[in-house]
Image: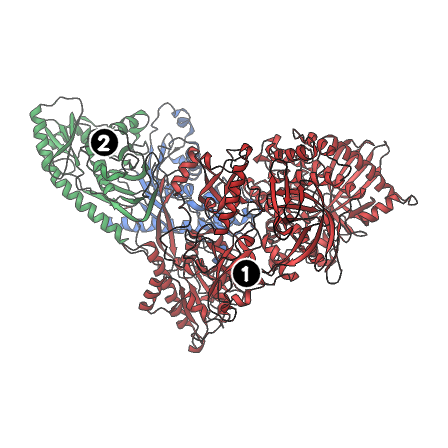
Amino acid sequence: MPLDNSSYSLALLRLDGRRWNELRRLSAQISTQAAADGSSYLEMGNTKIICTVDGPAEGRRGGAGGSEAQSGEAQVEVNINIAGFSGVERKKRTRGDKRTTEMQLVIKEAFASNLFTRLYPHSTIYISLHVLNQDGSLLAACLNATTLALIDAGIPMSDYIVACTAGSTSSYSANDENADPLLDLNGLEEQELPFLTVGTVGATEEVCVLAMETRVQIQRLEGMLAVGIDGCKQVKRILDGVVRAHGKEVLKKTL
Amino acid sequence: MASLKRPAPTDGNGPTLSSKVYIRATRLGKVQKIVREVYLRKDIPCSSKLCTKCLANAPRDSFGKAVSFVLSATPSATKCYPNGHYTVPDTNAFINAMDVFEAGTAFFDVIVLQTVLEEVRNHSIPLYHRLVSLSKNEDKRFYVFFNDFRQDTHVVRDHGETINDRNDRAVRSATKWYANHLADVVMARSRCPSIVMISDDNDNLRKAKVEGVDAQSLADYVSELEDSERLLDMISQAKTPQSLRGQHLYPDYYSQSKIQTGLNNGTLHQGTFSVSPYNYLEGTVFVSAFDRPLLILGRENGNRAVAGDFVAIELLPKAEWKAPSTKLLEEDNVNKNDNPEADDNEAIVTEHERRLLQEEAKKVHGKSKEGNPQPTARVVGIIKRNWRQYVGHIDKDSVKSSAKYSRSQQTVFLIPMDKRIPKIRVRTRMAKDLTGKRIVVAMDAWEQDSRFPIGHFIKSLGELEAKGAETEALLMEFDVQYRPFPKAVLDCLPSEGHDWVVPADPQDPGWRGRRDLRDLLVCSIDPPGCVDIDDALHAKKLPNGNFEIGVHIADVSNFVKPNNAMDAEAAARGTTVYLVDKRIDMLPMLLGTDLCSLKPYVERFAFSVIWEVTPNAAIVRADFTKSVIRSREAFSYEAAQKRIDDKSQKDELTDGMRTLLVLSKKLKQKRMNAGALNLASPEVRVETESETSDPVDVKTKQLLDTNSLVEEFMLLANISVATRVHQSFPQTALLRRHAAPPKTNFEELANQLKVKMGMDLKVDSSKALADSLDTCVDPQKPFINTLVRIMATRCMMSAEYFSAGTQAEPEFRHYGLASEIYTHFTSPIRRYADLMVHRQLAAAIDYELPDSSIHSRNKLEAICKNINVRHRNAQMAGRASVEYYVGQALKGRVIDEEGYVMRVFSNGCVVFVPRFGIEGLIRVRDMAEPEPESTFDNEDYSLTLSGSRKAKIELFQQVKVRISDEAEESTGKRKVRMDLL
Amino acid sequence: MVGLSLGEKHFIQGGIAQDLRSDGRKRLTYRPICVETGFIPQANGSARVRMGATNVISTVKAELGKPSSLQPDKGKVTIYVDCSPTAEPVFEGRGGDELSMELSVALQRCLLGGKSGAGAGIDLSSLIVVEGKICWDLYIDCLVVSSDGNLLDALGAAIKAALSNTGIPRVNVAVGASGDQQPEVDISDEEFMQFDTSDIPVIVTLTKAGRHYIVDATSEEESQMNSAVSISVNRKGHICGLTKRGGAGLDPSIILDMISVAKHVSEQLINKLDSEIAAAEADEDES
C-alpha cells in the first residue's frame, strides 16, 4: 500500500498525528532480565527491543581468540535476533541475513570505540538484542537499547550513544522543494520516504553512526541531518532520565 | 521485576497516545493485522480567524512558517443562522453532492473532518482528490480539521459499535466541540457563528438532535440557500432509494469472485467497451485473447455498460452470433418519444428498436450463404466504470409542457453530444430554464430497473450554438483544462516578466555550458501568425564540401524546472490545444509566446542539434548543445517559399534555406524508400474574420515544399535525439512508438478496394503498404487516392509515448515514419513530452544533473499515460472545433459540392466532402418521399434504390451532394444536412 | 551449561531430599508466575510468561489457508519455538536447533494432541471458515528470551495465555459461490472471535533428581536430573499428553505416582495461571 502523504501539507500533521519535529513515545526500562549482567527494554513507538549484556567475560569461542588475546582490549560481540512475529507478516527466522549482519556490525563498531574497552583486556562483551516488534527506526532503537543495557551492566563508556532517524516529507521522486524534514520515522513512513539513521555521542553533535539506505537529493540532506541530531539530543534527555530514575530506585532499595 | 507495559503517561502537555488497529486483506489473500500509533494532541487549531487562542499556537513547518487560518471571521449568514455559520458536512453529503460543494456560489467556510476525508477516500479516490483540491482553493475556505488527532474530539469505538456508528459519533462530537470552542473564545455573542452539521443520514440527524447538535439534512440546508433550485439539481440521484420493481430490465451482473474465476480460467474476458459511432446499439470489446474485437449487440447484451467502461464479457453460444450491423442507428432518431418519467411499463427494447432488429435479422438470414456472423458476446459485469461529466442538451420533447411554466421537479432526458453515450435521465426543477442550453451533467448510476442511466445536473454553459458555450462544451467533452493558470503557477515565472533578456555577460550562470551561436544565420518557418515559435533552422557550407545543419529548439526546460507548480500544471495539461479561434496553452503566455519563443531579432536560449551532413544528406555526425541564438527572420511557409523561389534573392540566409530545401527532399526520399507512409487526414482551415472570429470560409490546407522542409528536419532531430537519449537512459528514455497494425485491421478495406476498384492492398510491411497505396489511383477521380489514404489511416494503431524500459527494443519502431526509434523533442512549448525529453537530453550531455523525475520509471509511466490521453483528446477537440466552425460557416447557405461515398449501410451511406473535410450521413428515408425501397448488397458494398427513387449507391462512388443546415425540431440543435442529388 | 562443583551438587541434591530447595521452595512448589498479554500489537495474540529467570514470549498470528484434505473440517495450528543463541550461549549452533525442535514437538503433542487433532486443547473446527476450502491457520511462535530451567512448562503456559489473548477477525463468506470456485470472503474489521481456552491443558514437568522429583526445576537443578516426565493435564484432570525425557529408566509405578502428583499440582497451576491471565487481560484493557 503506497503511503499517502498528501494530507501532510493540509495541516502539517503526519499520518500518526505528530508534527515534523516530534519523536514518538520513547520509553525504556533498565535491569529487566535478572539473569543477565545488564539488560534493558526499550520502545520507540511500536518498535520494541529487549537488550541483554553479558560480560566482560572470557571469550566463548576459544579458537577465535587469537587476536583478542593480543589486542589488550575487550572485544564487543553483537547478536541481533529479529523475532519471526515482529513484522506485519510472519517470517520464519531472519537470523544471519545481510541486513541483520550489517546492523550488528554498525552497533559493534559504534560501541567498540565508545566503551573503555582497554580496561578489560582479553575479554569479550556480549550484546544481545531481541526485536519483538518492528515499526521503523530499528537500528536507532537497537543502539539506544544497547546503551541502556551497557550502563546497567556497569561497563564504563565516554558518553551515551543515542540515535534516531530523520527523513523528509516528500519522496525522492516527488522532490518537493518545500519538503519538511521529519524526525523519527515509523515503519509506514520508512517504506516510502527517504531517511537516514543518525547516532551521536551524548548530547554533543559528534556523529558516530550515520546510515542511509535511500536516495535523496543532496539539498535536503542538511536539513535531515540537523533534525536528526536535534532528535538525538531529545533521546539523550529521555534515556538519561531513565537511568537516573533507575539509579534512585536502586538506592532506595539498598537504603 | 520489570514489566513490559508502558508506564502511564506522566506529562500533562505532550500528546497522549492511542492506537488504531485494523485488519487488511492483501491481494494474495493474506490477512494482516496493522497497528498504527495515533498521537492525540491539543494544539490542532480550529482555524477560525475569530479565534486568537488557536492562532497563538498555530503549527509551524521547518521553515518557521505558520499555517494560515482558513475560516472567515464573518461567515455568510442565512435565515436560520443570522450570526453566520460554518458547516460540518458528513461523509454522505460529500459523496452525494460534491458538485454542490464545488459550486462557486455556495458552501464557503466548510470544516472537513479528518474522519470524513478518510471515509471519502475509502469510498472513491477521485472524489477524495476533488475534496483535497477544494481544501486548497483559497476562495472556498475549506478547512481540514484533524479531529481524530485532537484529544478533545478523538472518539474511541465502543464495544459492539460499528465503524460507521463510531464515525458518525466522531462527526457529531467534532461539531459539538467546535460550537463550544467558538462560544468560549468569541466574546461577542452576536459574532459567534453557528456550527451546522450536514448529513443525509437520518440516524445521524436523529442522534444529533438528541445530543443537541445543530444539524440539517443536505436538502433542507440547500433549500435555504440562494439559487437553491440549481444547487438541488446538482445532488446525486444515485442513492435516491427506488423501490425495486418486480421485474428487472437488465440481467444481474456476475459476482466479483465469479468474474475473477472466469477471467482466470479464460471463460470470461475483459476489455474496454466501445460503441460504434454509426450505431449506438453496436458495441465492441477488444480482448487480448482474440485478434478481432468481440461484438456486443443490443441494449440487453450491453447490459448498462457505457462507452469507455472496463467490462467483463462472456461469449454467447455460436447460434446467437451476429454479423456487425449494416445499419445506421442514432438514438435520438429512434426513440424520440420516450417518456422519461414513465418507468412502469418500461421495456428494455422499445417497440421501434424491436422492429429495426427484426429487419436486421431478416437481412442476416436472407444472406445466409455468407452472413459472416462474428463472435458475439454479452457484458456480465463492470470492472471499472469510466464515467465522466457529459455535455449535452435537454430533449425538448421530454419536458412536460406544464412544467415549462412551473418549477416542480420532473425528469427529463439529456442527449449527450457524444453519440455513443446513452440518454441520461436527469431530475430537475429548472426544465424550463435549461431547455435550449448546453448543459453539463454527471452520471450517477444505472439501475437494473431503468432503461437509461440516471444523472444529475452540474452546470449550464449557455445557449446552444453560442460560440462561447460550444467551445467550452467541447473543451469539457475532451477534458481539456482551460481555466486560467493559478497564481502558484504564475509565481514560477521569471520575475523580470517580459523584460527578461539573455544575460549580456557570458560569465553569467545562465551561460554556463551554452555555446554562443549568435552569429549563425538562423531563421524560423511556421504557419502564418504563429507566436509560439518552437523551432528555428540554419544551414552552412563547410570547407570540406559537407554542410552544417542546425535545428534550434526553444529552451523551455531552462524556465520550467522540475517539480514546481508550473511543471505540475504543464504535466497535467500535457499539450497545448489548438481550436479554430482559441489556443489553450500548456505554459503561461509569457513563456510560450515570448521568453521561450524563438522570435526574430532577439537573443534567445535554445537547445540545438547540429549535424554535419554530406551533400547526399548522409549524416556524418550529430552534436547536441544548449546554446544562445539570434533568429534573423520569422517566415511563414508561404513567405519562405516565395523567398526561395525568388531568383533575385542572393543573400546568405536565402541560400541557407535553399540548401535546407534540397537536403530535405533527399531526406524525404530516403524515408520514403525505407517505407514511410504518406498518410492523409482531412485537413481544412477555417478562415475567420479577425475581429469577431466568425467563420467566413473553409479552405483545405495547402502543402508547400517549405512545410515538408521543416517537417523533415524536425523528424531528423527527433530521431537523433531519441537515439542519444536512449543511449544514456536505456530504461527510462521517453520515446514514441507507432505499433504495426494487425493485418486484420486492413481486411475490410482491402476487400472493399478489391471489389470496387480491383486493387490489391498489400499490408505485409509499411513499405508494401506505402507502395500499394501509391497504386490506388483512379484517373477519373483524383481524390480517391486521398480518400483511400484517409481510410487506411483509420485502420492504423495510434502512436504512443512510452518509457524505454516498458517495451522490448524491436517494439520501439515507429511504423508510420519507418524509423527504428523516435521521440518528440522539437515542440517543448506545446508538448510536455518534448519538455521531458529536453531534460533527459540535458542530463545525457552532462549539461545538468538528472532530476529524479526523469529516471523514475513509475513517474515516467504515469506521465506517458497522461500525455497519451491528452494528446488524443487535444486532437479530437481540434477536429471537433473545425467541425463546429465548418457548420457555422455553412449556416444559412445551400451549397452543391462533390463528395465520395466512404461507407454504405443498408439504410443509408456516409459521404465525404473533400472541400470541407466533413463526412455526413444520408439516410434512405431522406432520399425521397415516400421512402424508397432499398436493397443492400453487403458483398458488393452497394445499395440499390427503387420505388420512389431509382438509383444505385456504391462505395467510392463520386456523388453530388447538397449541403445545407437544419435545426432539428426536437432538439433545437443545428446540424449539417446532406442530400444526394 | 551450568558448571557445578561437587559441593554445589551435593547441596542441591540434599536440598531436594529435605524438601527445601536452594531458592527456598518445596519440591512441588512453582516459582512465582508472572503473565503479561497483548504487548506485541501486530500479532493476533501475545503473552509473556516469566517463572523466575525463565522468560518466554509466545505470539499467535492467524492467516487464511486451506484445510488439509484429510481433515476438511479443521483448521491448522503450528507451533514453533525459537531458542535463539541470544538467550543462552548453549543455544548457539546446532544445540539451539535441536532444543527448538524438541520443545516444538513436545508442545505440539501436549497441546494439540495426535494427528487426527481429536485431542486438541482448542476446538480446531472453530477455525473453519468454509469447510474444505478456507480455514484459519494459527502460527504460534515462541521465543525464549532467557532460560533458567523448566522451559516446557513456561512455554505451555505462555501459549495458553497467548491464545486466550487472541482475537481472530470474523469472516463473512459471500453466498452463492459453489462448486470448485474459491469462495469470496469478506474479513470483518469490526468483529473478533475469541477462543475458548479453558480446555487447554497445562504442562507439568516433574524432574527426577535422586529418589525424589520436583516441579519447575531451575537450570541448576536440571543439571542434576536423571529423567523428567512432562504431563499435560486439562482442567477436568484428564491427561492430554505425556513425554518422558532423559535417559534413565523409570519404574512404571513411579510414573503412575508422578501422574497422580502432576494431576494434583496441575489444579493449582491452572488456577494460578487463570487468575494471572485474567489479571493481565484486565490490565491490558485498562491501558
Q: Kindly state the secondary structure of the residue where label 2 is placed.
A: helix
Asked where in the image residue B740 lies, by quadrant, the reply is top right
Would you call the spot at circle 1 few (<14 residues within 10 Å), some (14-19), or many (20 or more)?
Answer: many
Asked if one can make out residue B927 in the rendered structure from this viewpoint, the answer is yes
Q: How is the image coloured?
A: by chain
Q: State the green chain.
A: C
Q: Label 2: few (<14), some or many (≥20) within 10 Å? A: many
User: Farthest residue toward the front?
Assistant: B947
Discs 2, 1: same chain: no
Q: Nearer the viewer, residue B576 or B898?
A: B898
Q: Nearer the viewer, residue A126 or B895?
A: B895
* Residue B442 screen position, x and y as percent: 51, 56
Q: Which chain is blue?
A: A
Q: Which chain is red?
A: B
Compared across the picture, whether B654 is left or right of A3 comes to: right
The amino acid sitting under disc 2 is Gln
Chain of the residue under label 2 = C
- Residue shown at 42%/33% (left/top)? B265
Residue at horizontal 35%, vertical 65%? B205
Chain ID at mark 1: B
Inter-mark Cα distance, 2 to 1: 73 Å
* Total numbered badges shown on the rendered structure: 2
Give me the disc on residue B394.
1
From the top left corner, tell me how far across and down residue C112 is, in percent. 21, 33
**Image position, residue C52 (x, y; %):** 21, 39
Q: Is residue B635 left or right of residue A198?
A: right
For the residue pair B905 and B137, the one nearer the viewer reads as: B905
Disc number for residue C108? 2
| Mark 1: secondary structure | strand
Question: Residue B688's spot in the image, x, y percent?
Answer: 74, 57
